[in-house]
Image: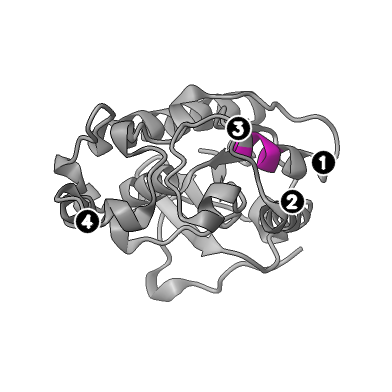
Amino acid sequence: MATVILVRHGRTTANASGLLAGRAVGVHLDQVGLDQAAATGERLAAVPVVGVVSSPLERCQQTAQLILDRQVGTPHAPVDVDLTECDYGQWQGRTLTDLATEDLWSAVQFQPSAVTFPGGESMAAMQARSVAAIRRHDAAFEAEYGPGAVWVAVSHGDIIKSILADALGMHLDLFQRINVGPASVSIVHYGTSRPSVYATNTEAGDLSWVSTSAHSGEAPVGGGAGHQAS
């Protein structure tokens, strides 16, 4: 199968002020976020990606564009609503400090599989639709470009954490153990037998090896020799 590079959007004005932006429109990257996304675009310039799929929210599209700006050619750049932020319902627009006083907060932290946000989406449904979207795009890119294809999905923190939890074989109730920082890069290869997670939450480092590595689908006993930069 192809390889997907999962990129969280850069820091936003809402992130900086401790607000849960959710699906609110008009939430843009602040200057720090623009710099973060540009740096991620620079890292990914070493990887010839075949497509960049983005959440429709502005902060993700801004991040996706900064990645595309450093790519040679014009890869596919569709928007997919299934990669959009969780629908936090009545929690949207409130501060994290305020939300931490809610009874539901503990369940979000320790039993997210049982959480449905008031007036919003369940976290289980969030994971199901985002994982399905990633696998759908992954199969489509491989069918068009071959098993060596590398593509990028730009999305949100909880979305990427839930995708990584699925790839790692973790129950959703454990996904809060995963950290996904602004403009961070995580890498998953969906093999024929199981996914392989090659990186999580990276903010620096060479990525040229991603497009040159052979993926056998089997784990090397003892850990193997690792990847070599091109």
Image label count: 4
The kind of secondary structure element at disc 2 is helix
**Residue 53 percent location from the top left of the image:** 60, 31
**Residue 72 percent location from the top left of the image:** 85, 39
Query: Which residue is nearer to you in this view: 72 or 125?
Result: 125
The kind of secondary structure element at disc 4 is loop
Query: Which residue is nearer to you in this view: 133 or 38?
Result: 38
The kind of secondary structure element at disc 3 is loop
Q: Marks 4 and 1, Cα distance to the nearest angstrom?
A: 42 Å
Q: Earlier in the sequence, mark 2 or mark 3?
A: 3
Q: From the image, tell me which residue sits under label 3.
A: 26
Q: From the image, tell me which residue sits under label 1.
A: 69
Q: Earlier in the sequence, mark 3 or mark 4?
A: 3
User: Is the residue marked by circle 4 packed among few (<14), some (14-19), or many (20+) residues within 10 Å?
Assistant: few
Residue drawn at (55%, 44%), measured in percent from left and top? 3
Find out whether the residues at labels 4 and 1 contact each other: C-beta distance under 8 Å: no
Q: Marks 1 and 2, Cα distance to the nearest angstrom?
A: 7 Å
Q: Earlier in the sequence, mark 4 or mark 2?
A: 2
User: Is the residue marked by circle 2 packed among few (<14), some (14-19), or many (20+) residues within 10 Å?
Assistant: many
**Residue 147 percent location from the top left of the image:** 58, 37
Residue drawn at (26%, 57%), measured in percent from left and top? 100
Foreground: disc 4 or disc 2: 4
User: Is the residue marked by circle 1 packed among few (<14), some (14-19), or many (20+) residues within 10 Å?
Assistant: some
Q: Amino acid at mark 4?
A: Thr
Is 61 a magenta residue?
yes
Q: Marks 3 and 4, Cα distance to the nearest angstrom?
A: 27 Å
Q: From the image, tell me which residue sits under label 2.
A: 41
**Residue 92 percent location from the top left of the image:** 38, 37
Q: Amino acid at mark 2?
A: Gly
